[in-house]
Structures are given as C-alpha cells and as structure tokens.
C-alpha cells in the first residue's frame, strides 16, 4: 500500500522507482532542492543503490503528482 501523503511520479517503474523508499524520498528531496544529476547519482551510490546517470536524468524530468490525504 502506498503512503497517500507521498508524491508519486507518473510513468513506468525506473531503477530509481525500485530503490528503497527512504532513498527514493531522499532523491525526490534532492531534486526539489535543485541538486545536479551527478550529485543525485553520487547520493544513490553512496547509500548502496545502483543507477545510471541517464536514469537519474529521466527520473528527474517526470512530473510529480501530489496526493492530498483524504
């Protein structure tokens, strides 16, 4: 079950989507804070995740859908 307070991205499941939720939330926050693709890639790898620079670039361009708790 998804957390209804977490914004989700539209589209297919990328390698970033398959990261643990805590790390994915850190990636989403880094994108919101304006971090570079290289910074985000380094963050993921430092936390033990695996991704390509291209995957981060594609993920960062996907629109967010903000869910409002009901």
Image (cartoon, rainbow, N blue to C red):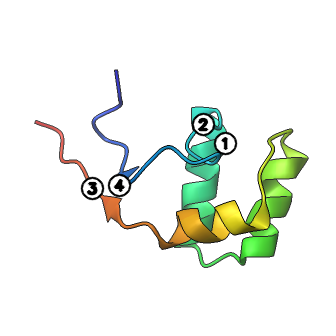
Q: Nearer the viewer, mark 4 or mark 3?
A: 4
Query: Disc 1 and disc 4: Cα gap in Å?
Result: 18 Å
**Which label sits in the foreground, 2 or 3?**
2
Q: Which residue is mark 3?
A: 66
Image location (x, y in percent) of residue 6: 37, 44
Cα distance between the residues tagged 2 and 3: 19 Å
Determine the secondary structure under disc 3.
Answer: loop
Q: Earlier in the sequence, mark 2 or mark 3?
A: 2
Query: Tag 2, which secondary structure?
Result: loop
Task: Tell me whether circle 3 and circle 1 mark residues in contact (CB < 8 Å).
Answer: no
Looking at the image, which residue is at 23% across and 48% down?
A: 67
Q: CA distance from mark 3 to mark 1?
A: 18 Å
Left or right: where 40 falls relative to 18: right
CB contact under 8 Å: marks 1 and 4: no
Precedes in sequence: disc 4 or disc 2: 4
How far is mark 4 from mark 2, CA to CA? 14 Å
- Of the 4 image quadrants, the one containing the N terminus is top left
Q: Earlier in the sequence, mark 2 or mark 1?
A: 2
The image quadrant of residue 10 is bottom left
């Amino acid at each position: 079950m998804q957390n209804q307070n977490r914004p989700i991205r539209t589209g297919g499941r990328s390698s970033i989507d398959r990261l643990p939720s805590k790390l994915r939330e850190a990636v989403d926050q880094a994108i919101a804070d304006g971090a570079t693709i290289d910074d985000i890639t380094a963050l993921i790898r430092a936390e033990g995740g695996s991704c390509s620079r291209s995957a981060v670039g594609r993920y960062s361009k996907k629109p967010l859908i903000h869910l409002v708790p009901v």
